[in-house]
Amino acid sequence: MDLPAEPQIRWILRTTATLLDLGAEPVRGLVQPTADFFPDHFDASPKSAAAVLTRVLEHAGLEDIAVELSVVTPEGETKSGGGCSSGACAAPVGKGQKFDRIAVLPDGGYRVALAAGELRHSVVLTTSLVRAVSFIFLNEVGAWDVLQPRDREPAVDMAAVLLGFGVLVANGSYIYAKGCGGVQVHSATKMAVDEITLALAVFCRLHQVSDRAVERHLELTPRAHFEEAAVWAASNSALVKLLRENPSAITADAYTLSESRSWLARTLRIGTRRSRTLDDDLAMLERALPEAKRNGAGQPPDPARQAKLAELRALVDESLDA
């Protein structure tokens, strides 16, 4: 599986730094699609969808914000209240139709809308609700003032990952569906699967989440992309630390990306230039002594070289005894 292109990787890192500064941190850790996080019975009804929305709000730490849910039929319905300007708020209803995903209500609350068809697909449903809640988070922290208009919709996906919903949106970024023409691939996210999984790998490094915990609940294609992204994140661990220690360097693009290297290559330092050690100097001098004897037979040994050799031997012996 290929990683995103370098410009997109840099965008992911810049946006991560920006959203971290705005407080995009997980409240419940890594949220998984399990009964531990979503214990309510789901029967594809609007009531059960509202229960999922309530859980997502709780996991994002936004349970105090008033949010109501409505379901839009294929015939459509007129929605009142102000709509958001982000494409993240638009969802398909029927052929050629769209509706506002989120409406900001006069009292400061929100109305989240689902298409009736989304209730029948759990991955699409959870992804749509997670993205809606991520939009609410960005709206509440004033993110639109610091994000470029073209970055706002993919930033909704980024916020979802950083709030702990990376597994859910990764699965929603690559959905197999059977159609009249055979198997098709759909996405309920703006970012592509390789981009979301790389952002998820960075999240894991930031919060010391094990790769296995993530892979356990990823679907086949997102899992394959995440495995490659996790290798990249491990190879760039120093860069990930900059997101906390020096985020201005990230936003200024003042860093160099490292190539992905496997755990074994990193452990054995394969592909990197190793610095010289005392053993290297000792071996070099020992190789040089026979050559010196051949070239200068009968000449007295060089006192300086003999002293250096003795010093190096003593240091090596001391390190071995320690």
Image: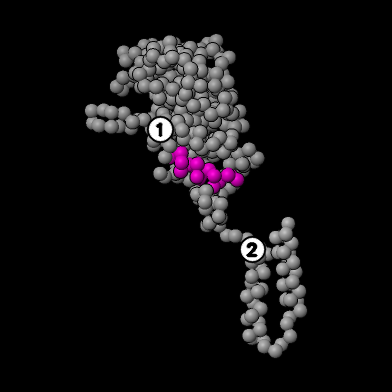
User: Left or right of 225: which side holds 73?
Assistant: left
Residue 264: % across, % down:
52, 51
Look at 67% across and 69% down and name the residue there: 282
Q: Which residues are magenta?
A: 225-239
How packed mark 2 is, by other alpha carbons closer than 10 Å (few <14, some 14-19, many 20 or more), is few
On-image quarter of the N terminus? top left
Of the pair 88 and 201, the residue shown nearer to us: 201
Residue underneath mark 1: 219
**Image quadrant assignment for residue 194:** top left
Residue underneath mark 2: 276
Look at 50% across and 49% down and name the residue there: 262
Residue 297: % across, % down:
67, 88
Residue 205: % across, % down:
57, 38
Mark 2 vs mark 1, CA separation in Å: 45 Å
Dot 1 amino acid type: Glu
Q: Earlier in the sequence, mark 2 or mark 1?
A: 1
User: Left or right of 69: which side holds 247?
Assistant: right
**Image quadrant assignment for residue 127:** top left
Of the pair 6 and 147, the residue shown nearer to us: 6
Can residue 67 be seen? yes
Of the pair 222 and 242, the residue shown nearer to us: 222
